[in-house]
Amino acid sequence: MFLQFKFLIILRAIWFAAQIAFFGLIASRMVVPALADIYFEYYVAGVVIMMLYSTSVFIGYDIFEEAEHGVFEYLLSLPVSRRELVLGRSIGGGIRSFIFVGPLIAIALFVIGLENPLNFLIAFLALFLFAFGVSGMSITIAVGLKSSDHFDILMGVLNAFIIRLSTTMYPQTFVQDASQAYAVLTNFNPVTFASDLFRWGVGIEKYLTMTPMPLAAIIGLVIFFFTFTFIGVTIYERRLEGGGWQ
Amino acid sequence: MKAVLHVIEHDFRNFFRYKWWLAGLISMNLADLFIMAVVYNQMVSPDIAEQIISYFSFFAPGVTIIGLFASAYMIGREINMEVRRQIHHYMLSLPITRLELAIGRLLAGGLRGMVYMSPLLLTTFLFLGFPSLPQLLVILGALFLLATGISGLSIATAVSTTSLEKFVTARGMVYYVLFFCSSIFYPLSLIQDLGRDGVMPQFVVMLAEFNPLSSGADLIRSFLLGTPEFTFNMIRNLVVFSTIFATTATFAYMKIIQRK
């Protein structure tokens, strides 16, 4: 089903290339000397997480497609419990986003380099939790709304705020200097946990937000994953009963 | 002329049907300005800060251009849908010449961009200061030229793509190339430096220099911030861009709606 989004995938790949080849490269010349040395690598790692987030969100669009084309009825006729269905969708959504982001992670590793493969392996595995959690969040929002247009708009706005109020593009110390309120929100953002974890995994340890690493980020992601998976399961189950998706 | 106004009115009515979408878009633009630009303010090196005053001030005209581009480009999506669903047959049955129809669509796309962009431009003025009346007229005229050119570019893309997915992909490519290869996010001098160092190919540097989005953003900055200096090249770039794409779109649209 994911491959149906081939044009969207092409689009995201172009976005990835434009982000690192233009914005990353040029912005690294614009920042303060203390950050300039590592900013390009820092930004490339952030773009990988932005991409992982945006592809994990795709599952929500599938929910609307299925409701529109009557696939829900078919799914409900399968010998699978509602809980298994949602959990499967959430995990499936996360895994398929990894399939897409995999080559981009390889490009990022080529650009950044890899200091400690074990750290990277730990970060890579923990990022699955992030992808599953984002898929769960997308499912939760999708089943809570009746219109795919509203979903599209809400995800766009959420994406704008969740990415900008995270450390994907800039270190926490600069967010703190800019605004205390932004810094508080950035600290509790799962995208910050994922960005920190990925950077720790590839050896960009300057400007990490969370301590001790990787434990703090992993705990954050575990909480995020469980929260949205179980909220998603509960809401999805309720909506499925009695044709609530129609 | 009356027929053109009717077409513009039709497209404006369509535009306001997307009010939630527009609200979403404007909140994304404001998130860029009030979160991203505010944080980058702290990150910009003193050398660059000397050139641009502050990143927030520098980026405010940029975000105005982003909003103008996104909203003026929306007309293409509607035209692509009309062509795919053959709604243009209805358009052809109206007592309007094809030229009037094409001009009406083109101008509507541009004017919609101007309407959407106005609150962003006003926000820019509120934070950076108001220009003098002649400067304001030049800014509005230049932005209208830019919006019409973007509308033309969008219509030309819409009539040359056979599916919504292809249109959206083409739109994404145009967006990313024009946005990132311009002075919207960073000063042109940085791209030129990278070109001189051999990091950025020369054609990319040239594209950034002639990019109408660079000209639009820099024109507003020149009046509100005094940097970069205003040059007539900015107006020239916008006139050339607008003329090329307005003409191409008018003829391409007239041709596609006559196709059996």
Image (tube, coloured by chain):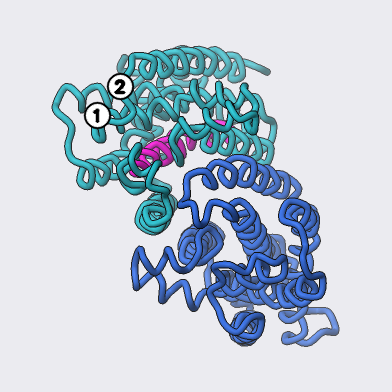
Chain colours: A blue, B cyan
As shown in the figure, which amino acid type bears the numbered disc 1? Answer: Phe
Q: Position of residue B145 (x, y in %)?
A: 37, 21
Q: Please, what secondary structure does the residue beneath circle 2 have?
A: loop
Is A197 part of what is drawn in magenta? no
Tell which residue pokes out farthest to the front in this image. A33
Q: Residue at x 41, y 72 (%)?
A: A183
Label for residue B230? 2
Provide the chain ID for the residue under circle 2.
B
Q: Is residue B260 left or right of residue B145?
A: right
Q: Are marks 2 and 1 in contact (CB under 8 Å)?
A: yes
As drawn, is B258 to the left or to the right of B188?
right
Q: Quadrant of the C terminus of chain A?
A: bottom right
Q: Which residue is mark 1?
A: B223
Which percent across, then down, holds residue A126? 72, 77
Q: Which residues are magenta?
A: B58-81
Q: Is residue A27 visible?
A: yes
Q: Amino acid at mark 2?
A: Phe
Picture coordinates of residue A160, whole percent (x, y)? 48, 58
Residue positioned most to the right = A79
Residue at disc 1, secondary structure? helix
- Examine the residues drawn in magenta and state their main secondary structure: helix
